């Protein structure tokens, strides 16, 4: 049950955008795909929704092969990155659009609005709503058909930073309540980690690792995931600069600055939320660690590394 993807390949002309994607999203799960811009996230969602024809591979929803079904027969709803509400229609009319003409359309739309806490906005027009309210209307419209799978493409991109935390919570709570299998795409890792039951890292049309946010953060499968996950991500260095073997990944939180067996030069210092992130130069590499004091750029500093991860080449 849920969603399964096997060997999905999609090219635009000569440009292969999806390079053989295998993915299993469990029934009722909130699954996040995190990747840089251009990694193919939106294209993957569009393939699942049936808006792009795949070159090869299969897509199954609840064990049914939907690869060649038209969008309307897949029970998938997609909330686009720049979702558009119809400006000349009221909130109620916007929500009703996907079920126009169906039995009880009005009642179903009102029930959905009730569930999303926007019942008192039904007679307003989109221009009379805040960004967060517009997002809820778009979500109501996406859910009013009660799809099996909900696809969210950067759903917070239209929302101002101060409202993001509550909007994030809102989506997670709604998803939990509805237990709807959801794929949520973002390039923002704080958002990804906050929302995900499990998540995948996508790069250049490939899935590099799937796991819980904790697994990806503490145990990245390779140096590419390690160099991407975390803010800042692990510093990836050739261990020999510290007398260690192999390629190693070091998290800033695991570096103690001021004492220890290693020495480097302070390359840069950034004030970040109450402490200083110190970039320590080690020849061609750098490690990063936190300090309570503003160290001087160019000064030598001793440090220790409490733990690190070794990667195969
Ligand atoms: N219809 C199209 N025709 C040609 N190339 C396309 C088309 N749609 C997407 N691409 C290309 O495919 C690649 C992946 O795009 P996609 O939008 O899937 O990435 P993304 O990870 O969602 O990025 P973003 O976060 O910027 O939306 C990009 O290089 C893009 O230019």
Image (cartoon, rainbow, N blue to C red):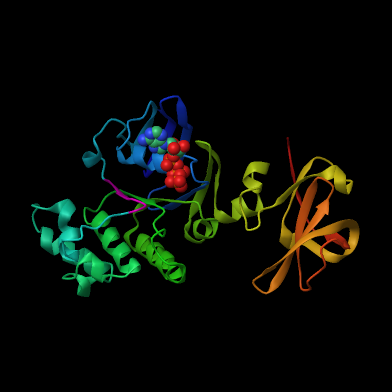
Q: Position of residue 267 (x, y in %)?
A: 79, 58
Residue 39 in magenta? no
Residue 79 in magenta? yes
Residue pushed farthest right? 261
Compare residues 85 and 192 and report the one nearer the observer.
85
- From the viewer's perspective, is 248 left or right of 15? right
Instruction: Examine the rendered structure and indicate whether residue 33 appears above or below residue 89.
Output: above
Quadrant location of residue 53?
top left
Q: Position of residue 64 (x, y in %)?
A: 30, 36
Tell me which image quadrant ligand 1 sits in: top left
Q: Is residue 281 visible?
A: yes
* Quadrant in the picture for the C terminus: top right
- From the viewer's perspective, is 94 left or right of 152? left
Instruction: Examine the rendered structure and indicate whether residue 195 appears above or below residue 123.
Output: above
Compare residues 94 and 88 and report the one nearer the observer.
88
Q: Is residue 41 visible?
A: no
Q: Residue at x 18, y 69 (%)?
A: 122
Q: Position of residue 148 (x, y in %)?
A: 29, 48
Q: Which residues are magenta?
A: 76-82
Quadrant location of residue 13?
top left
Compare residues 74 and 289 and report the one nearer the observer.
289
Q: Position of residue 110 (x, y in %)?
A: 17, 66
Q: Residue at x 22, y 57 (%)?
A: 144
So how many labels did they put on this image?
0
* Quadrant in the picture for the N terminus: top left
- From the viewer's perspective, is 312 left or right of 175? right
Instruction: Examine the rendered structure and indicate whether residue 237 appears above or below residue 17.
Output: below
């Amino acid at each position: 049950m849920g969603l399964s993807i096997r060997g999905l390949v999609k090219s635009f002309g000569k440009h292969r955008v999806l390079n053989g994607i295998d993915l299993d999203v469990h029934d009722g799960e909130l699954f996040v795909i995190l990747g840089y811009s251009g990694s193919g996230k939106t294209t993957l969602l569009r393939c699942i929704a049936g808006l792009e024809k795949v070159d090869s591979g299969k897509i199954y929803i609840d064990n049914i092969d939907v690869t060649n079904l038209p969008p309307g027969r897949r029970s998938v709803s997609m909330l686009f990155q720049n979702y558009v509400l119809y400006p000349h229609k009221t909130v109620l009319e916007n929500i009703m659009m996907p079920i126009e003409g169906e039995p009880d359309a009005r009642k179903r739309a009102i029930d959905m609005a009730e569930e999303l806490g926007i019942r008192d906005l039904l007679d307003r027009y989109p221009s009379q709503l805040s960004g967060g309210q517009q997002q809820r209307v778009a979500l109501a419209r996406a859910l009013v058909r009660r799809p099996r799978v909900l696809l969210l493409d950067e759903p917070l991109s239209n929302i101002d930073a101060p409202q993001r935390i509550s909007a994030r919570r809102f989506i997670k709570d709604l998803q939990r309540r509805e237990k709807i299998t959801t794929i949520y795409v973002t390039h923002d890792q704080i958002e990804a980690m906050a929302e995900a039951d499990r998540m995948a890292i996508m790069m250049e049309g490939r899935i590099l690792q799937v796991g819980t946010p904790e697994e990806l953060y503490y145990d990245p499968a390779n140096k590419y995931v390690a160099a991407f996950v975390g803010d800042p991500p692990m510093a990836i260095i050739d261990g020999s600069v510290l007398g260690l073997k192999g390629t190693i990944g070091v998290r800033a939180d695991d570096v103690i600055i001021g004492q220890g067996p290693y020495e480097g030069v302070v390359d840069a210092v950034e004030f970040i939320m109450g402490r200083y992130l110190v970039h320590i130069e080690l020849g061609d590499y750098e490690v990063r660690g936190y300090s309570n004091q503003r160290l001087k750029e160019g000064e030598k500093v001793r440090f220790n590394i409490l733990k690190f991860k070794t990667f195969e080449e």
